[in-house]
Amino acid sequence: MRVLLILCFILCVNLQAYAQKKSEPAPKTQPDSKTSGNPIFPGWYADPEGIIFGDKYWVYPTYSAPYEQQVFMDAFSSPDLVNWTKHNSIIDTASVKWAHKAMWAPSIIEKDKKYYLFFGANDIQSNSELGGIGVAVADNPEGPFKDHLGKPLIGQFHNGAQPIDQFVFKDKDGQHYLIYGGWRHCNIAKLNDDFTGFVPFEDGTTFREITPEGYVEGPFMFRKNGKYYFMWSEGGWGGPNYRVAYAISDSPLGPFKRVDTILKQDPAVATGAGHHSVIHNATQGQWFIVYHRRPLGETDANHRVTCIDKMEFDSKGFIKPVKITTTGVPSLQLK
């Protein structure tokens, strides 16, 4: 009887270990030390914001889990896109009293030697709920970040846009814009100097809609050769056909006419490739797209991993379709 109990105990332990292993993402695929492999770091992470601070690349993702478990954010840094260091819980709901779930899609920018982290929280569905887009501040890229306002920066719906998926864009004249929106609507607004509010446009409005055809969520903007590239995600975030499209304009305010899809699933590699950001190594003229995707065989909507691949342009300045890979990108230090 005693032997039977011991055997049962061993079996239970092994079953628990197996179940736990099955719930974890696949290990980082890294064929050799000269490439990043995809995913670039282990764990369920989505909506990654990639950026360069000093001599390091940084990625700030959403912790991909049920909404009630999304109460913190981690960050990752690397000197070469291959070797990544995890910075645990750079912000959490303990430091943002009005947030209690669904901390999403961070966007970060450095200004006057401070680091400002913009985030969504609470997944509000109406103007009667507390939540929306917040901003936190820290002295270092790894935090810890503290609530900058003690309340949401945007806590209401404007032009039909759910206040989520914010991106901070700095224009060549030094003006900072907040571009955001879910529910198939995208707004742009001019941030004031200390990121505590907004400056109205010349016509007196604060939130201007710039929604292009096909837009769903996840806006991102960069400038290249005097043109403004506006990018966004289409499709459903939980499905296989999540993808990224883009437009080009002469102004950050648009108008933006959809050009094409440039990131999507490859049934031989992964599904649900979307909600991206772009890293530009200006010194070496290299562009990279950082995005999330779902490993083959995964059916849980939250089972998403963060990946990186090259992004290239043709002779006319259009973005070439991105080939998603398991190898990722070569090692590239910042010089």
Image: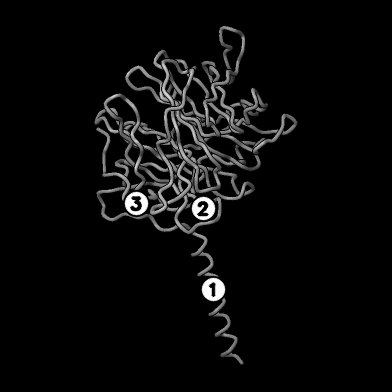
- List the residue tagged with mark 2: 303
The single residue placed furthest to the bottom in the displayed view is 1
Q: CA distance from mark 2 to mark 3?
A: 17 Å
Residue 260 found in image quarter: top left
Say which quadrant the N terminus sits in. bottom right
**Callout 1 secondary element:** helix
Assign the C terminus to one quadrant of the image: top left
Q: Which residue is mark 3?
A: 326
Residue at disc 3, secondary structure = loop
Q: First in sequence: mark 3 or mark 1? A: 1
Above-or-below relation of 156 to 290: above
Q: Position of residue 294 (x, y in %)?
A: 47, 51
Residue 11, horizontal then vertical, whole percent: 54, 79
Q: Amino acid type of disc 2?
A: His
249 to the left or right of 96: left
Pointer 2 with pointer 3, Cβ within 8 A: no
Residue 300 x %, y %: 55, 55
Q: Nearer the viewer, residue 31 or 208?
A: 208
Which mark sits nearer the N-terminus, 2 or 1? Answer: 1
Judge from the rendering whether residue 55 lies leftward or rightward of residue 272; answer left or right.
Answer: left
In the image, 314: left or right of 10?
A: left
Disc 2 versus disc 1: nearer the observer: 2
- Badge 1: how crowded within 10 Å, few (<14), some, or many (20+)? few
For the residue labelled by badge 2, is the local secondary structure a helix, a strand or a loop?
Answer: loop
Q: Is residue 4 left or right of residue 327?
A: right
Residue at the spot 58% in from the left edge and 83% down from the top edge: 8
| Mark pair 3, 1: CA separation | 30 Å
Discs 3/1, front? 3
* Residue located at (56% from left, 90% from top): 3
Circle 3: residue type: Thr
Q: Residue at x 50, y 48 (%)?
A: 240
Q: Which mark is residue 15?
A: 1
